[in-house]
Image (cartoon, rainbow, N blue to C red):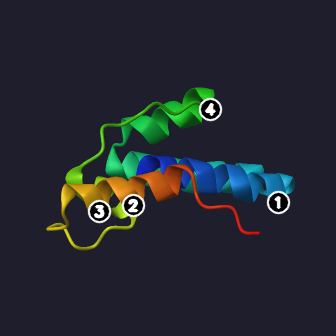
Amino acid sequence: MKGPRFYAITNLNKLADHPKDEAALREALKCIAEHRQDSVLLTYLEDGTTYDVPFTIDVAYQRLGIEDRTLDDSIILSVYQLKVDPPSSQ
């Protein structure tokens, strides 16, 4: 399931690409926000801001791209470090 920040960022990206579609995009986002009764999306529609929503464990693993939840802590830390500071390609 995609989180509220995904929808807000997607909305911003689409708006940047197609500014004339702002009303339709806002209406689509409003429909999703109201259907889900999502405070993050509703706040975004009101003032254009999002705030940090606590991650669920599912989102945390997904954000790091980790499928195997039994990985050793050292491997999880290595994955994190690679995401934060990817090796430069030379």
Mark 4 or mark 3, earlier in chain: 4
Three-letter amino acid code at the position of disc 2: Val
Question: Which residue occupies 33% across, 53% down?
Answer: 77
Q: CA distance from mark 2 to mark 4?
A: 32 Å
Mark 1 or mark 3, earlier in chain: 1
Residue found at the far left of this picture? 70
Q: CA distance from mark 4 to mark 3?
A: 37 Å
Residue 83 position within the rendered picture, expressed as x and y whole percent measured from the top left: 50, 56
Which tag is nearer the camera, tag 2 or tag 4? 2
Q: CA distance from mark 1 to mark 3?
A: 39 Å
Q: CA distance from mark 1 to mark 2?
A: 33 Å
Residue 26 makes an appearance in the image: yes
Left or right side of 11 for 29? left
Under circle 4, the secondary element is loop
Residue found at the far front of this picture? 90
Q: Which residue is mark 2?
A: 79
Q: Which residue is mark 1?
A: 17
Three-letter amino acid code at the position of disc 3: Ile
Under circle 3, the secondary element is helix
Determine the image quadrant of residue 54.
top left
Q: Which residue is mark 4?
A: 48
Q: Which mark is residue 75?
A: 3
Residue 88 position within the rendered picture, expressed as x and y whole percent measured from the top left: 69, 61
Mark 1 or mark 2, earlier in chain: 1
Q: Please, is residue 52 above or below residue 13 in the view?
A: above
* Labelled pair 2, 3 in contact (Cβ < 8 Å): yes
Question: Which residue occupies 57% across, 57% down?
Answer: 28
Left or right side of 10 for 71? left
Residue found at the far bottom of this picture? 68
Three-letter amino acid code at the position of disc 1: Asp
Which tag is nearer the camera, tag 4 or tag 3? 3
